[in-house]
Amino acid sequence: MENLLKSCLGCLGLFILLSLVIGGCTSYFSIKEYDKTNVSVSEKAGEETSNHEADEAVSKEKGNWQSKLQEVAASSKTKTEKLNEVSFYAQGYKASGSERTEFENHIVNEYKTGKYLADIENDEYMLTNLFKAKVVNTHYNHQGQKNTPIALFALDFWQNTKYTYQRILDADSHEVQANEEQMDKALAKR
């Protein structure tokens, strides 16, 4: 009986230790990911004074993201490699407020019209949807607003698009349908 108690306590101790290590790593990497934004409070204040410059930079960047997606779509990489490259690029992309609103409207419209999973063979189309959804979701996560309806919608949109694009799930699968129910709920609250 005593050995059983020692074994249970040993397992419990190991579990707690692993939880602390994993939690610490998660916190560390979450902070590192957030730090990639390179936006400080003083920079945010400065944005208001240089809106014209920011708009010009965003205009130039807009052409760049489209070119980047076309380049990735045309490459000989696997769908997973293309997805990973576009997702990484989207996480660092800084959309203007109007551009982010356009991205939000685009993904909502693609969902409402039923187009978003209709052409999973079209790499450029799917990568564009993935990019826009990831930009929207990343923005709200960095703002501490990951539970807003549009952020939740963008996450489910991204997941459905990702898993069908990679052919992990079929468009009519139970998982996709469950996400679409969540998307409908998010849109009802929007």
Image (cartoon, rainbow, N blue to C red):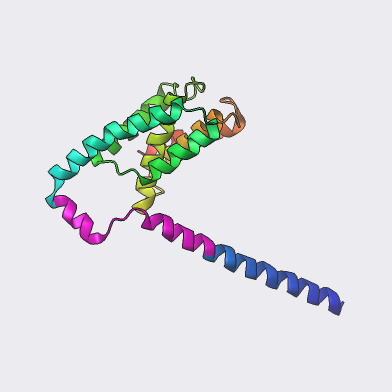
Residue at the outermost right position: 1
Q: Position of residue 59 (x, y in %)?
A: 22, 35
- Residue 81 horizontal side relative to residue 97, left or right: right
Near-viewer residue (182 or 140): 140
Q: Say if residue 43 shows up in the picture.
A: yes
In the depicted structure, whether residue 111 falls above or below residue 56 = above
Q: Residue at position x 27%, y 37% from top?
A: 61
- Quarter location, residue 10: bottom right
- Quarter location, residue 188: top left
- Residue 44 drawn in magenta: yes
Q: Residue at position x 13%, y 49% from top?
A: 50
Q: Residue at position x 22%, y 57% from top?
A: 43
Q: Main secondary structure of the magenta part?
A: helix
- Residue 45 horizontal side relative to residue 159, left or right: left
For the image shown, how many numbered marks are present on the structure?
A: 0
Q: Say if residue 182 shows up in the picture.
A: no
- Quarter location, residue 55: top left
Q: Residue at position x 52%, y 31% from top?
A: 77
* Quarter of the image with the N terminus in it: bottom right
Near-viewer residue (155 or 168): 168
Residue at the outermost bottom position: 2
* Quarter of the image with the C terminus in it: top left
Near-viewer residue (9 or 187): 9
Q: Position of residue 115 (x, y in %)?
A: 44, 21
Q: Position of residue 74 (x, y in %)?
A: 45, 25
Q: Which residues are magenta?
A: 25-48
Q: Position of residue 144 (x, y in %)?
A: 36, 54
- Residue 146 drawn in magenta: no
- Residue 105 horizontal side relative to residue 45, left or right: right
In the depicted structure, whether residue 139 falls above or below residue 5 = above
